[in-house]
Image (cartoon, rainbow, N blue to C red):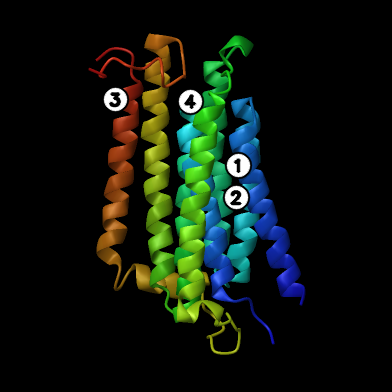
Amino acid sequence: MAETIFFIVFALGALGFSAAVLIAKNPINSAVMLVCSFFCLAGIYVMLSATFMAVIQILVYAGAIMVLFIFVLMLLNIRDDEIEAPRLSIHQGIAILAGTGIFFTIALSIAAWSGSSSRVAHDTMSDTFGTVEPIGDQLITSYVLPFEMAAILLLVGIVGAVVVAKKRF
Amino acid sequence: MFGIPIGWYLTLSAALFVLGAIGLVLRRNAIVMFMCIEIMLNAVNLTFIAFARYHNDLGGHLFVFMVIAVAAAEAGIGLALIVNVYRHRRSLNVDDINLMQG
């Protein structure tokens, strides 16, 4: 019962804060709402016994990536007159209608899937599932190539960001 | 009976993904559009983690690890691009960035 309550709180939190990201006029408010949404998602990861991923979510997403967003927003120092005017309401209507249609299509196909009502129970799983040890173990055995590729990707990302943001070559 | 049906997690993920997609279409501010992409990435991560739990397989967690690494690189480069565009155009509105539209 408690698990259901936690799920509903975190799910409504994630959805509500994500909706607030779209609605907020000021981009800084959007960024702060997004951080709150990431915290709610981290709570849901914990409920799925992905504890390491929950910590990474808070450290990297809410910590590093969103600080970068807020840093850029502060750096650009957007004046009030640049805060966007709302789009034409017909565009909004079409987008929301199409989005709702897509959502119900996905939701109906999930409901039709035979495994969708099977519960995520805690008795069939090993105690260490989702902790640092098995993930680190997999990362340097079966997944060592993707791991090294991620390292190269991040290196290229650093160099690319420096080159792109430079004023003169 | 304990546990939550996996369909709930998948439906939440679908709702988050659609929210991100709607935001990407509606908002014209480049940085807010970027944030909507992050919401969509997180929705996919949630699906990965729910299925990892469902199949009792850590592969999903490793995928999420890679997605977060790619999102970090993407945020770094994308924000550098946005800073550069703002320097030239003095605007973050993507409707003003039309140099390559025919």
Residue A124 found in image quarter: bottom right
Q: Is residue B99 above or below residue A146?
A: above
Residue A34: give its label. Answer: 1
Q: Give, as a three-letter code, the residue at label 2.
A: Phe
- Find disc 4 in the rendering and name its residue: B28
Mark 2 touching mark 1, by CB under 8 A? yes
* Image vertical order of residue A104 relative to residue A131, above or below: above
Amino acid type assigned to the residue bearing label 1 in the image: Leu
Chain of the residue under the numbered disc 4 shown in the image: B
Alpha-carbon span between mark 4 and mark 1: 17 Å
> Residue under mark 3: which chain is it in?
A
Q: Could you confirm whether marks 4 and 1 are on the same chain?
A: no
Provide the chain ID for the residue under circle 1: A
Q: Which of the marked residues, 3 or 1, is nearer the chain's N terminus?
A: 1
Tell me the crowding category of disc 4: few under 14, some 14 to 19, or many 20 or more residues within 10 angstroms, Cα based. many
Indicate which label's residue lies in the foreground, 3 or 2: 2
What distance separates the C-alpha of mark 3 from that of mark 2? 30 Å
Q: Which residue is mark 3?
A: A163
Whole-percent x, y for residue B43 in the image: 50, 55
Q: Which residue occupies the foreground of this view, A100 or A15? A: A100
Q: Which mark is residue A38?
A: 2
